[in-house]
Image: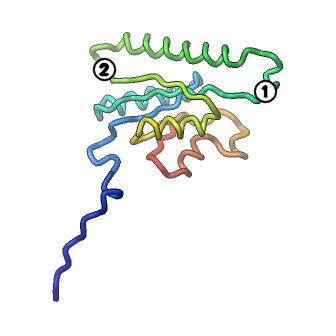
Amino acid sequence: MTEQQPQPLPDSQRFERGTDGPKVIVAGVDGSDSSLRAAAYASGLARRQNALLALVYVQPVLPAGAALGAPVADTTGEIAEGLVAEIREAAERVRGIWDVRWEFHTFRGDPYSGLVTAADELTADAVVVGASESAGHRIIGSVAVRLVKAGRWPVTVVP
């Protein structure tokens, strides 16, 4: 009986996510209570793992005419600025006690595609999102469910 030695993997298969814990944790934020709880949860994960916390806001893009002349881009830009200000304020309050490396990113598109793009571009090891607060998502599926079904990263859904 001969013992077979394992064959080395080709270079294209050598990359392995999460071997030493996550290095980048993406958290989707939109200003809702559940997304802010998700950001707080992700912050704790990032602190314990010494990972980078990438907070991501996806600015919705509405089809032409859907906004009926409302300055949608200005509004979503103001939301992003408000979120950054709120995050900076919270980080200052806990500086020295709860130090977390974090970045804020904005992407444009629908929330699911924006978070997928963010996670891919930032080479995320994990994604954290808040549970949907919309009753309609029970029928068409929430962003969280779609991210889980994508099966590309560990996804934590925070209630």
Amino acid type indicated by mark 2: Asp
Residue 14 lies, in percent from the top left, at 30, 56
Q: Nearer the viewer, residue 108 or 48?
A: 108
What's the colour scheme? rainbow
Residue 116 lies, in percent from the top left, at 53, 40
Q: Is residue 31 left or right of residue 27?
A: right
Which quadrant of the figure contains the C terminus? top right
Q: Is residue 11 left or right of residue 2?
A: right
Quadrant assignment, res 67: top right
Q: Please give the residue where the numbered disc 1 appears in the rendered image.
A: 64
Cβ atoms at labels 1 and 2 below 8 Å apart: no
Residue at left offset 59%, top offset 39%: 113
Quadrant assignment, res 130: top right
Instruction: Of the two numbered discs 1 and 2 on the same chain, state the one appearing first in sequence.
Output: 1
Identify the element where label 2 is drawn: loop
Residue 16 lies, in percent from the top left, at 33, 51
Q: Please give the residue where the numbered disc 2 appears in the rendered image.
A: 99
Q: Nearer the viewer, mark 1 or mark 2?
A: 1
Q: Nearer the viewer, residue 65 or 19?
A: 65
Identify the element where label 1 is drawn: loop
Residue at left offset 46%, top offset 37%: 121
Q: Is residue 54 left or right of residue 95?
A: right
Q: Nearer the viewer, residue 103 or 93?
A: 103
Residue at left offset 83%, top offset 20%: 68
Residue 78 lies, in percent from the top left, at 61, 13
Compared to residue 92, the image places residue 40 above or below, namely below
